[in-house]
Amino acid sequence: MASFFSDPWALAAVGIAVPAVLMGKFLVTRFFTLPHSEPEPSPKRAVPGEEDEVFVLYQGKQSIAGPSGSLSIFCLKVETFLRVAKIPFSVKGALPSTAPKGKIPFAKHGSTTTCDSHYMLEYLLNTFSKEGTSREHAESTRKGDAAGMLGDLALPGTMDARQLAVAKAIEVVIEHRLYYNGMMLRWGHDDGFAKITKIFFGAVPAIIKPFILRMVRRNVWDTMRAQGVATHHVSDVDRREIEDWDTVATLFETSGTPFLGGDAPCPQDCTLFAALDNLLNTPFPSKAKDHVIAKHPALVEYADAFRARFFPDAGPVDMAVRRESKLVML
């Protein structure tokens, strides 16, 4: 053994072999292994006897003005649903690296863990309404809820086929188009990323901050490029975002009702509010934000009234943030 450590050729071989093995492992993991290739199916409802357990929502917590501590529309969507449906819950901070599927939000309810905002809402509807998410259901399993309601939430069974289709179409536009447009302007554009840096990475030690910023931004960029939005010029993204908000506004304004669910908010209203509040009341300037404020006052009024009703603890809208896009550290 002593002769091994005294042999420069042996040490050189080890010095080359170890990095080569580590690099090989990285390349295999990065390019040839499919993560979550066989994920477990999402739980449909609570374990019998655990319905009364507190629902714990894990989401990112950033110091920023807004009704929720999270900049994610998906985290805010779930928190909004819980508030509207009057389901007891608590919130804990989390990072994507601590999440079961590498993304937030996720939640724990008794012995059950749920991931992805869509499946969380499905789980909650299945747990607290008689027929789950089927179109026919219209009754809560809880005592004291009005017919067809879960708290202040209109259950999907109370909506006609067209109402439900319009609500789901708006949700798809928001989650699969507008979300990535906003992501591009915040993480891809230098001005937006400068504010992201202050919000997310202010506490990172200066000596490692450049490496962390580059690594995280690159990971987000890869996601946006795979989706397609990062292949376009920022002016194209601006134009598409404005067109998408016009579509959402038209569908909402022609419904003739105060909410997508009619006279009461439905699950898709939680998505619409989350997207609007994230657009209007965060310190990221965008042409779409200015366009919605100028051209679609009905959407702005809807978002402000929704916030005042279901997030009274958040306080009034900070108009300075809305007009001037100033970063407000709470």
Image (cartoon, rainbow, N blue to C red):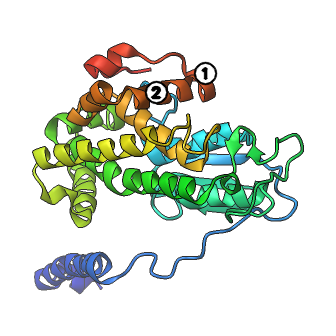
Pick whichever, 128 or 5, lies toward us.
Answer: 128
Q: Residue at x 64, y 53 (%)?
A: 159
For marks 1 and 2, give the CA distance: 10 Å
Q: Looking at the picture, does residue 7 appear above or below residue 185?
A: below
Q: Residue at x 37, y 54 (%)?
A: 173
- Which residue, given by chain and number where applicable, does mark 1 sit on? 313
Residue 206 place in picture, x, y as percent: 24, 35
At label 2, counting other C-alpha atoms closer than 10 Å, the crowd grade (few under 14, some 14-19, many 20 or more) is many
Q: Looking at the picture, does residue 221 appear above or below residue 269?
A: below
Tell me, yes or no, if residue 151 can be seen here: yes
Q: Looking at the picture, does residue 280 appear above or below residue 141?
A: above
Pick whichever, 300 or 175, lies toward us.
Answer: 300
- Which residue, given by chain and number where applicable, does mark 2 sit on? 66
Label 1, secondary structure: give it: helix
Tell me, yes or no, if residue 284 can be seen here: no
Residue 280 place in picture, x, y as percent: 36, 29
Q: Amino acid at mark 1?
A: Asp
Residue 33 location, quadrant:
bottom left
Residue 193 place in picture, x, y as percent: 22, 39
- Asked if marks 1 and 2 touch (Cβ < 8 Å), the reply is no
Residue 293 location, quadrant:
top left
Residue 47 place in picture, x, y as percent: 80, 65
In the picture, the disc for residue 182 is: none
Q: Give the quarter of the figure containing the N terminus.
A: bottom left
